[in-house]
Image (spheres, coloured by chain):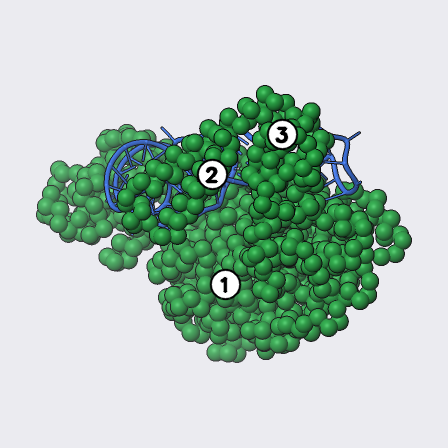
Chain colours: A green, B blue
RNA sequence: GGGCGCGUAGCUCAGUGGGAGAGCGCUCGCUUCACACGCGAGAGGUCGCUGGUUCGAAACCAGCCGUGCCCACCA
């Protein structure tokens, strides 16, 4: 360490992340550590494809949590010498992005229709060029060690090729088809959306009962509906085939009020005879169930509500009204005709668009669909066989249940921004051409008047290709060979179906292998008050503000600490705990680095080689334990390394970081550093070596979760040889586990604590050193120093016992307080003895509990009794 | 309607069969030469309720109460 660095370290008594993070990140980028060569095999390498954020997005807590988890694993594996790739990029996010640009246009008083498709799409690209990399920059603030040189976008040229190839192959296999079918129509975006983009909400509507006269009789069938306006499109009335009340009417006709259309009365098992009157009006054009029934019975499909949510020319007098207006008008007309039998409040689940928030209008339209059964089959097997492992375990079940009932996927969207469907229609011979590249002429008639399909693909169609399209598929690239399948995916559970399942299906179908080995479904971080974090509710907490305030390491630590398996409220205290830890590390390091005596012969070029590849620099300083406390520290450290590693590998990030915290605060700082301070100040080389060794390992162990502070401290370490990012991740060394030293020092620590507690309870002045003698053992020097007792026996009468220690009378001691404390201790012991005795008198316990447990209880009783006897 | 969670200290959460834990907050004492974003010592829980299994239950089982999420085509 040169003089300037030493001075910097001496003067900086607090860790200040703000000044450091940007510089450290720039060093990493300059070093090219995040940009691996495409060499090796997927089995040897480690790779992760980031869930691509929307180009319109700003980093939110979900990203920050997700990113913290991925980065922890990515960094750990990189430090293990694996060729590690974390690929990132953004999603074109059809609806969201189109909405942002349309809003801009509106502010200028323009619409996209005025602009025209081509100009509009150009405009969106311009927007993307200007703002699209914002979120990528924000990931850097978090410290995410992505390969920023391999950034991808779901609409870049290579990606478009992949999408076209997939579409064509699925079409050629007969999975993709075009059909007039009932879809979830979102009047807000004026597009069809998939089942997964619909959310059901409880709504209270009116349930209307309407009389439909039966033709040729004076009977009526009373039907119930919450959507009376759709009656204009009714094409039948259905009853249950076993319903005797109506058996004689099946086959005859009703007359539709207001319209006069003849409606066949049909029998279908779907109808519940218990509900209402047991007669159901059938509207195949505007109800998914009725649609199914209609197809079963070959009913006419009439559509009265158009894509704009208004009634069309089929609606006669009601044309042009909105659905709500039409409802009022239809009800009024029915009432006038005396057909309205009743009206009552009715609460039920109603579909709403996840995208626009508007109520879904189910209607029949011409869309592109993808049949999923065949694709799902191997994707089910992959998860059943744990080729793709989903954790926590309950999500495996959820995945399999959903996949078992998978339905066709509506993949077309009536938008302009996105992958325009690679289908062309021939204007001359009606041929439909599906091609990867724009065709010159019709292959059937050689005609050249080809018109491309207007619709674009669902954004998730391209997202589904993410793990392999980003690696260059469909070309056989070095990246694909080195990094596919990827190793790990972490995701929020809400996109398990929307995204994860589809990647598994597409991965197996196209590159021919699963897209990732492990999926970890993480918990949701809620707002501080337990509500959802959401922009619209104003409950979001901005991770960048938190980074600004406490540092990226603090936020990362906090989020990981919060992320147990259950959903959890955002906790400022956990983030603060992270910044406390960073500061603690910084200051403990200052103590070590400014006082340790380092000489080159400590650096062990002959360090034992283990499994860490040569490409990774390994630890360079060897410890020199000479006391039990040294061996204790090293033993505790190795245990911590083993445990933290195990937790990280099991995606148990919360416990991993908490254990790091406990080791640094407890074992290292509260005890070991306090214990060895005298030796350190004397310049002892042995303890210096041990401390530098321990610090190196601690920094490496913590680097995956707190990369900035550890990298910065490492820059002051005398053994430093390059950045910490590529330093070897510590492997626990079982040779350093020392049970004897651990037990011995643990006992001395316990004694120190009880001596301190005793003094506090008796009210001894903090600085007073109390005379005492100790029976039977010669404790380490630190026990007396840290508890401020002098075990030299200089003093008068013993006045109290604390374990093996006899405290001697001195003027600092208040006799009354001492005897008070003594009495309290007697009470405690009596209670404990009573408890243990009762337990041991229980015959069932002695007979059935494991011998070790009984023995332990006997030992305790023994100890309590003898302590009580000593107190007199 | 089906499924999955959760209910533990004032707050946020750990803890899957052998004497209730962490962080924050609170109380008391310390400007001890790494750190006052610090150090030391404490107070504070009939572990939602009721039954059951067990020598032993916060943990396992059943029921109930409260609460959250996912899936679902009864108008």
Give me the residue at 62% from left, 54% from top.
Answer: A632
Camera sees residue A550: no
Q: Is residue A367 left or right of residue A616?
A: left
Mark sitting on residue A821: none
Return the residue nearer the eye: A39 or A422. Answer: A39
Within the image, what quadrant is residue A381 found in?
Answer: bottom left
Q: Are marks 3 and 2 in contact (CB under 8 Å)?
A: no
Return the residue nearer the eye: A258 or A149. Answer: A149
**Coordinates of residue A706 in the picture (x, y in percent):** 66, 52
Return the residue nearer the eye: A677 or A383. Answer: A677
Q: Secondary structure at mark 3?
A: loop
Q: Are marks 2 and 1 in contact (CB under 8 Å)?
A: no
Q: Secondary structure at mark 2?
A: helix
Q: How far apart are the two marked residues, 2 and 1, measured between alpha carbons? A: 55 Å
Q: How far apart are the two marked residues, 3 and 2, measured between alpha carbons? A: 21 Å
Give me the residue at 34% from left, 37% from top.
Answer: A838
Q: Earlier in the sequence, mark 2 or mark 1?
A: 1
Q: Residues within 10 Å of mark 3 (few under 14, many from 20)?
A: few
Give me the residue at 54% from left, 66% from top.
Answer: A487
Residue at the disc numbered 3? A797
Q: Chain of mark 2?
A: A
Q: Residues within 10 Å of mark 1 (few under 14, many from 20)?
A: some
Within the image, what quadrant is residue A471 found in?
Answer: bottom right
Q: Secondary structure at mark 1?
A: strand
**Coordinates of residue A22 in the picture (x, y in percent):** 76, 51
Mark in the foreground, 3 or 1: 3
Mark in the foreground, 3 or 2: 3
Residue at the disc numbered 1? A518
Residue at the disc numbered 2? A866
């Amino acid at each position: 360490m040169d003089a300037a660095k030493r001075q910097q370290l001496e003067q900086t008594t607090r860790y200040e992340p703000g000044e450091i993070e940007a510089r450290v990140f720039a060093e990493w980028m300059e070093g090219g550590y995040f940009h691996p060569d495409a060499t090796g095999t997927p089995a040897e390498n480690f790779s992760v494809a980031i869930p691509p954020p929307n180009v319109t997005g700003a980093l939110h807590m979900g990203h920050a949590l997700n990113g913290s988890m991925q980065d922890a694993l990515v960094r750990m594996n990189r430090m293990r010498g694996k060729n590690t790739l974390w690929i990132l990029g953004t999603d074109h996010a059809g609806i969201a992005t189109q909405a942002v640009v349309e809003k801009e246009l509106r502010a200028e008083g323009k619409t996209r229709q005025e602009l025209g498709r081509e100009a509009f799409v150009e405009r969106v690209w311009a927007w993307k060029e200007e703002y699209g990399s914002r979120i990528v920059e924000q990931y850097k603030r978090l410290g995410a060690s992505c390969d920023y040189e391999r950034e991808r976008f779901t609409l870049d040229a290579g990606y478009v090729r992949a999408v076209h190839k997939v579409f064509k192959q699925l079409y050629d296999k007969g999975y993709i088809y075009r059909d007039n079918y009932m879809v979830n129509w979102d009047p807000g975006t004026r597009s069809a959306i998939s089942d997964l983009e619909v959310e059901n909400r409880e709504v209270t509507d009116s349930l209307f009962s309407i009389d439909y006269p039966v033709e040729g009789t004076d009977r009526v069938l009373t039907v119930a509906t919450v959507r009376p306006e759709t009656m204009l499109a009714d094409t039948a009335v259905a009853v249950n085939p076993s319903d005797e009340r109506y058996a004689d009417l099946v086959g005859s006709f009703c007359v539709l009020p207001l319209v006069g259309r003849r409606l066949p009365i049909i029998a279908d098992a779907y109808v519940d005879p218990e509900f209402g009157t047991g007669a159901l009006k059938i509207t195949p054009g505007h109800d998914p169930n009725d649609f199914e029934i209609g197809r079963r019975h070959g009913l006419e499909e009439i559509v009265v509500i158009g894509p704009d949510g208004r009634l069309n020319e089929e609606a006669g007098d009601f044309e042009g009204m909105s659905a709500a207006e039409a409802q009022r008008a239809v009800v009024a007309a029915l009432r006038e005709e005396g057909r309205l039998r009743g009206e009552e409040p009715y609460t039920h689940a109603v579909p709403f668009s996840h995208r626009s928030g508007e109520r879904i209008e189910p209607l029949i339209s011409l869309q592109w669909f993808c049949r999923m059964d065949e694709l799902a089959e191997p994707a089910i097997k992959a998860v059943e066989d744990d080729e793709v492992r989903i954790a926590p375990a309950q999500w495996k079940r959820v995945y399999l249940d959903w996949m078992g009932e998978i339905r066709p996927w509506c993949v077309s969207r009536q938008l302009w921004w996105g992958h325009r469907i690679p289908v062309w229609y021939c204007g001359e011979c009606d041929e439909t051409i599906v091609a990867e590249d724009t065709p010159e002429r019709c292959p059937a008639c050689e005609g050249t008047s080809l018109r491309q399909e207007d619709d674009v693909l669902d954004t998730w169609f391209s997202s589904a290709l993410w793990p392999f399209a980003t690696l260059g598929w469909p070309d056989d690239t070095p990246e694909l060979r080195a990094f596919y399948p990827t190793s790990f995916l972490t995701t929020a559970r809400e996109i398990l179906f929307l995204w994860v399942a589809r990647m598994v299906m597409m991965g197996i179908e196209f590159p021919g292998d699963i897209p990732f080995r492990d999926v970890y479904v993480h918990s949701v971080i809620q707002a501080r008050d337990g509500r959802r974090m959401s922009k619209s509710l104003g409950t979001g907490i901005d991770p960048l503000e938190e980074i600004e305030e406490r540092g990226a390491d603090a936020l990362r630590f906090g989020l990981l600490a919060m992320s147990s398996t259950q959903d959890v409220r955002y906790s400022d205290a956990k983030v603060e705990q992270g910044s406390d830890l960073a500061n603690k590390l910084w200051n403990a390091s200052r103590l070590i680095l400014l006082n340790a005596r380092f000489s080159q012969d400590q650096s062990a070029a002959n360090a034992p080689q283990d499994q860490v590849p040569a490409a990774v620099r390994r630890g360079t300083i060897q410890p020199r334990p000479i006391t039990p406390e040294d061996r204790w520290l090293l033993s505790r450290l190795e245990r911590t390394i083993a445990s933290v590693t195990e937790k990280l590998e099991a995606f148990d990030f919360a416990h991993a970081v908490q254990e790091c915290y406990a080791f640094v605060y407890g074992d290292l700082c509260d005890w070991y550093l306090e214990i060895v301070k005298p030796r350190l100040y004397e310049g002892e080389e042995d303890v210096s070596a041990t401390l530098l060794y321990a610090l190196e390992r601690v920094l490496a162990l913590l680097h995956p979760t707190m990369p900035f502070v550890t990298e910065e401290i490492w820059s002051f370490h005398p053994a430093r040889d390059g950045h910490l990012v590529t330093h070897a991740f510590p492997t626990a060394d079982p040779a350093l586990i020392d049970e004897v030293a651990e037990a011995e020092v643990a006992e001395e620590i316990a004694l120190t604590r009880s001596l301190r507690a005793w003094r506090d309870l008796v009210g001894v002045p903090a600085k007073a050193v109390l005379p005492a003698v100790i029976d039977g053992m010669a404790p380490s020097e630190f026990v007396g120093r840290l508890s401020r007792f002098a075990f030299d026996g200089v003093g008068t009468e013993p006045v109290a016992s604390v374990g093996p220690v006899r405290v001697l009378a001195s003027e600092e001691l208040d006799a009354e307080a001492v005897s008070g404390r003594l009495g309290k201790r007697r009470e405690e012991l009596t209670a404990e003895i009573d408890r243990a005795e009762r337990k041991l008198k229980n015959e069932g316990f002695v007979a059935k509990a494991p011998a070790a447990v009984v023995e332990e209880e006997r030992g305790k009783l023994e100890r309590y009794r003898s302590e009580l006897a000593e107190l007199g």
